[in-house]
Image (tube, rainbow, N blue to C red):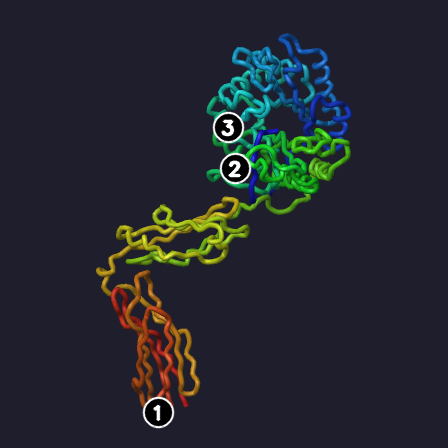
Amino acid sequence: MPALAVLAFALVPVSGAHAATAGVNLAGVPTPADLDAAAASGAHSVRVFARWVDAEPSQGPIRPEWQKAFQDIAAGAKARGMTPVFVITASPQWASGSANPNTPPSPDHVGDFAAFTGQVAGLLKGNGAAYEIWNEEDESDFWSSGPDPARYVALLRGAYGAIKAADPSAPVLLGPLTGNNYAFLQQLYDAGAKGSFDAASVHTDTACLDRGPDQFYRDNGRLARFTFLGYREVRQTMLANGDDKPIWMTELGWSTTGQTCSRGTWAGQKPAGVTEANQATYLRMAFHCMAGDSYVQQALWFTQRDAAAADGELNRYGLLRFDGSAKPSLAAFSDVAAGRDTITGACGDFDPPVITIQRPTAGVQYAAALTIQAVATDASGIGRITFKADGKEIRNFTGADAKNGQAVSIGWQGAKKLSMGKHTITVEALDPSGNTSTQSVDVVHVDASKLGSTLPTKVTVKSLKRNGRKATLRGLVVKTGELGLSGKAQVVWQWKASGKAKFKTLHKSLKPANKPFTFTQTLRKGGSWRVQVRYVAVAPYKASASAWKAFTVK
């Protein structure tokens, strides 16, 4: 298990029928009864630690009793239809110079480690065994001197060559990355790891994990290391280095402890585990999430049985309780191991917010302050809305100000300081998962004094209502720019006598053109009438007029 982790919220659709082959981790040196229990659960593989320090506590040949025990494990797993996966780790003091078995061998004993792995592969050949080279070498819990990509790659290369010489068909796995540590994986590639492993292994059973596998957050735009779905970033890192290799998730799991987190970033701040019911649910969800990613070939639950009766995070990862009774997760595991996926729908919300820029409109001209108004909508809510001009941030809206589905706006005075000419206004929105979308419009900063009367307008009559001879007309002058609209809206009421061809203006009045207008007029006579509203031009806007509306008054 790794030393620390953080897992936060939110959610790629799963498609395709492939499901990762389900296996289980076994503690210590498993007995035939342990192998029977694993086989009864439906496990197709078992993972066991093969500790160098136990096999060769003093420099010399492998201890016969260790050899027999592991040959029995390998043969027993094969006989029960399971693939044995052995984690070769833990240095003896003579090889590392330290009493701590998690100290890697010193440089002058790397060859001894390689020789040991080759001997193990030779002894266990014929049982379909796979080998992981060390365990979580990217954290000091298992690589006590601190992560050292170059030193690990030297260990990996030697072991790979020795195992392949002894058993060419045996899969050799990169030591598991703690919490999908794709940054460390890139360091391994930089140090020359390519070509020295057949699959990359990852661990997603990170400390104090209490969120489901469909929930994630992002780190610099990528799925974060300590999210379950971060294995997709491991895959992308491999492909970016020209390495189309599979992934084995050799540990996944959720603890059923009732305690508060005691280690890592969230120590003392959150639960250290989940309920037994949620453990079963998250197990099903995890295999459902992996079902669409065919490159995930193996997934081994950590672990088969609780480590102790006492409550505690590390003691409660089992499918079985310490007394051997089944948790709900055992039935869930048996289902996924048999290929039964009871979860439907997408694994995670990867849809970014939808943005509509309401103001300004594309190509609009402005000369003073610029109104920016936008709406962002997302099923999971809005985490942040950002307004930008030419790529530079104007303002962020967060918390209660980042309204989901409601307009947010500013009257940006800083627009007056932009140079004359075209500029790009961008609205960016992200949801709680970090899914991000952007929309942009171009605007033009102009010198209004040099425009003349060039910008179009449109007079719109919204309604005309009459009550006897009393007529009420409502409408507005629509401008095509952000420049302020001055001038007047003039209404003209014209009457025509019966049998006459021409209309005569009987009423006129004015209203400010920069806001919606309402004209109410008591008409002087009965007969045929028509009405029109005209915008009286004031630079930089052109004059315009509505269509005539005709009506009859008795």
Tag 3 secondary structure: helix
Labels 1 and 2: the sequence-earlier one: 2
Q: Of discs 1 and 2, which sits in the foreground?
A: 2
Frontmost residue, 24 versus 495: 24
Residue drawn at (56%, 41%) of the image: 8
Q: In this view, does 40 lie above or below 102?
A: below
Residue drawn at (66%, 22%) of the image: 49
The extreme bottom residue here reads 499
Q: How crowded is mark 3: few (under 14 residues within 10 Å), some or many (20 or more)?
A: some
Q: Distance between the residues labelled 1 and 2?
A: 81 Å
Tag 1 secondary structure: loop
The extreme top residue here reads 60
Location of mark 3 (residue): 184
- Percent across and percent down for residue 283 are 66, 38
484 sits left or right of 51 in the view = left
Residue 257 occupies quadrant: top right
Labels 3 and 1: the sequence-earlier one: 3
- Percent across and percent down for residue 148 are 50, 22
Q: Is residue 215 above or below residue 523?
A: above
Location of mark 1 (residue): 498
Residue 163 in sight from this viewpoint: no
Which amino acid type is shown beneath numbered disc 1? Ser
Location of mark 2 (residue): 224
Q: Residues within 10 Å of mark 2 (few under 14, many from 20)?
A: many
Residue drawn at (75%, 26%) of the image: 34
Tag 2 secondary structure: loop
Labels 2 and 3: the sequence-earlier one: 3
- Percent across and percent down for residue 23 are 68, 31
State the mark number for residue 75. Answer: none
